Amino acid sequence: MRLRKAAGQDFRRSLQTSSKVEARKRLAPFLDEISHIQYHGEARRTWKDAVVEWAAHAPDNVAPTTLKRYKVSLRQVGPANIDGTLFENLHLEEINRKAVAALVAARKKDGATNATIRRDLTAMSSVFEACIARAWIEDNPAAIYSRSAIKERRDPIVLPAAEDVDYVVGRAPGNFARLIRFAQQTGLREEECASLIHRQVRADAVDVIGKRNRVRSVPLTEEAGGTLRGT
């Protein structure tokens, strides 16, 4: 057992070894943690601590689909090996641009694509912003990191031929056929078409709630308006 006192508190921890050399190695981070408490009045927080705290409040600030994607990224980031230490065990003040660069390299080594890594950084940025709000850190290293080296390359979008759309519409049942046709006529996403309610529809346009709850107005052509009226 090793006992230390700081900020009026007693700290006791077993070093779990009979080797003096190993004990000195294990004692160093323990003393470092106590020193932080003594001078800052609180324990150091790890990336894992930050994610746990973020997850408790994220549903109030992040859309459900976005939250689901963020959680996938954060589960992949935590176990990444950064110079022999799991990323989730790094203290927040240790995570700088160099640490983020090491994480990107580790994710690439694991086979993650640039697109996946960019989404990982976006999820991490959300956690760091929550940490800034709690005064745990001052900067957001995921936002500062330059993404120019991990550019996302997307395949070009090729629209289906009109006759192919006609073929599918002719074999789709009822309102599902109209849904496909309405998407073709307006360019709206599937979810945007399927979730429309009456108050979003005007005589010459529809007000669509898209990504990040942003509202945009999409003009209704005569054909699109006819599809809606038929529905």
Image (tube, helix red, strand yellow):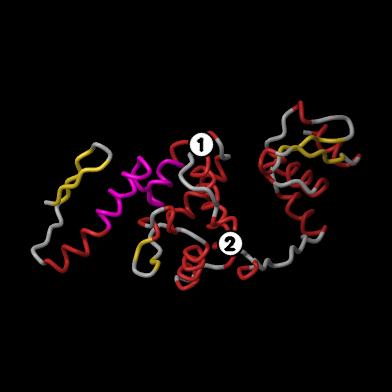
Q: Is residue 156 magenta?
A: no
Quadrant hosting residue 212: top right
Q: What secondary structure characterizes most of the magenta part?
A: helix
What's the magenta region?
Answer: 29-54
Quadrant hosting residue 141: bottom right
Quadrant hosting residue 153: bottom right
Instruction: State the image coordinates of residue 133 (x, y, percent, origin top left).
Output: 52, 39
Instruction: State the image coordinates of residue 156 (x, y, percent, origin top left).
Output: 73, 66
> Of the residues shown, which amino acid type is indicated by label 2?
Tyr
Task: Single out the residue that lies furthest toward the right.
Answer: 222
Residue placed at 42% from the left, 41% from the top? 53
Residue placed at 50% from the left, 63% from the top? 100
Residue placed at 35% from the left, 41% from the top? 42
Label 1 sits on a secondary structure element that is helix
Q: Is residue 126 in view?
A: yes
Q: Is residue 174 in view?
A: no
Q: Quadrant of the C terminus?
A: top right
Residue 40 sits above or below residue 26 on the image: above
Q: Which mark is residue 157?
A: none
Which one is nearer the viewer's eye here, 70 or 121? 121
Return the disc, 2 or 1, that comes first in the chain's sequence. 1
> Of the residues shown, which amino acid type is indicated by label 1?
Pro
Which one is nearer the viewer's eye here, 187 or 62? 62
Query: Label 1, on which residue?
Result: 59
